[in-house]
Image (cartoon, rainbow, N blue to C red):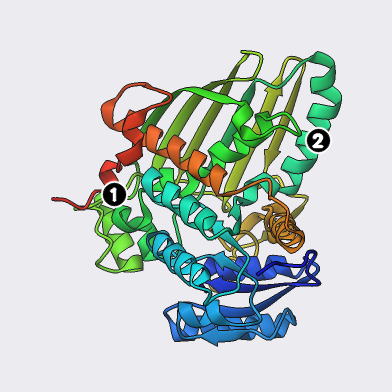
Amino acid sequence: MATNYPLKKLRLGFVGSGFIGHFHLQAMIGVRNVEINGVYSPTPANREKLARAVSIAELGDCKAHDSLESLLQAPDVDAIWILAPNYTRLEVMQTINRMVKSGDSGIIAVACEKPLARTLAEAREMLGLAEDADLNHGYLENQVFCTPVLRGKEIIWRRAAATTGRPYLARAAEEHSGPHEPWFWRGDLQGGGVLSDMMCHSVEVARFMLTEPGQSRDSLRLKTINGTVAYLKWTRPDYVKRLKDMMGNEVDYAKRPAEDFARALLTLEDQDGAELVIESTTSWAYVGPGLRIQLELLGPEYAMEFSSLNTGLKIFMSREVRGDQGEDLVEKQNAEQGLMPVLDDEPSVYGYVDENRHMVECFRKGRTPIETFHDGVAVMEILMALYRSAELGELVKMPCPELETYIPPVARTES
């Protein structure tokens, strides 16, 4: 059935009702022409909680569905946001494909949180299923849409690169003290450790910063990939026990750990053959005020730098101020006393508002987003190359056919 663009409003259904679902909900408050009319997750209490939060925010008449099929059949849902755990995403996409092709669902678009899948093979299948069902698709990589990234890239390319030459080095780091949910810590469910969980952000925002405005990420050709992983903090006996106490016995880093540190060095070349470099580190072993994102872009006569913890607002609290642990000042907050940076609008600074605004408007008007499942596949190819490089202890030259069926050691289920 033909769609008459532009739609007056894009009506969304969320698959998943955890931490990231509530982050997207907060971001949608800053987006026009959108409603959240449905949510499905397997935990009734969680989906009911998100539906109530939608109503409180006055973002739609949100129904908590008891099955994915029910959500997909809803007549007031145009697009699906896949916000479910990594190990469920392919099955969700298979169901979407089946129901759209059979005519049982009228959705026209799908967006998926990072990473797109757990392996390159899964990522390619996600893309194939979306295109087979003729769905518009978007890859939800929020760091590409961070307000400092968008503004900084625009200034660098318009003023500095136009005068002295294109940027040639991008650095990206993301660190915090560890994920919120048990499945994140399990390589078999998540697809890896911190490399899978956070390096997907870093390599894509770095590729974005290095890409000339108006050009696709494919204009940069990957040449070599060198990766390192390490087990720094959470395999120490005291922290193995602490992790079990926090996440339950299913997370046992004495027997089945996942890496908590990863480093990446990528070499690329642009359309003129000029060499470019991406340098990135990620960690679950960082203890500081909270989540730290550090981004840099360097060129012949200029540099750009952003740190998420260099905030304009800071608060000091002495020893006399006591309270429960929380994350009301900054995500992954590690202290309630001392000098604390405060992110006064996390959804905007982290890019979720502009990301969702962009996806909603593209889907509403039938346009292709700047981040699609194609980019999700490209990111997954890089991640698999990094894991393979770390496993073999050698440089991976691109393209690498072995990546098509590669599974990182941390994600392998055989004994």
Residue 370 percent across, percent down from the top left:
68, 45
Q: Quadrant of the N terminus?
A: bottom right
Q: Is residue 115 visible?
A: no
Which sits in the foreground, 277 or 217?
Answer: 217
Do labels 2 and 1 touch, CB within 8 Å? no
Residue 248 percent across, percent down from the top left:
29, 69
* In this view, 408 is above or below 96: above
Q: Is residue 102 visible?
A: yes
Q: Which residue is mark 1?
A: 411
Q: Give the amino acid type for the residue marked by disc 1 in the picture.
A: Ala
| Residue under the image location 63 percent in, 27 percent down | 219
- The answer to whether residue 267 is left or right of residue 254 is right
Residue 66 percent across, percent down from the top left:
46, 86
Which sits in the foreground, 199 or 10?
Answer: 10
Q: Give the amino acid type for the residue marked by disc 2 in the picture.
A: Glu
| Residue under the image location 35 percent in, 35 percent down | 403
Mark with earlier residue (2, 1): 2
Q: Residue lying farthest front?
A: 1
- Helix, strand or loop at label 1? It is helix
Q: Which image quadrant is residue 396 in?
A: top left
- The answer to whether residue 408 is left or right of residue 46 is left
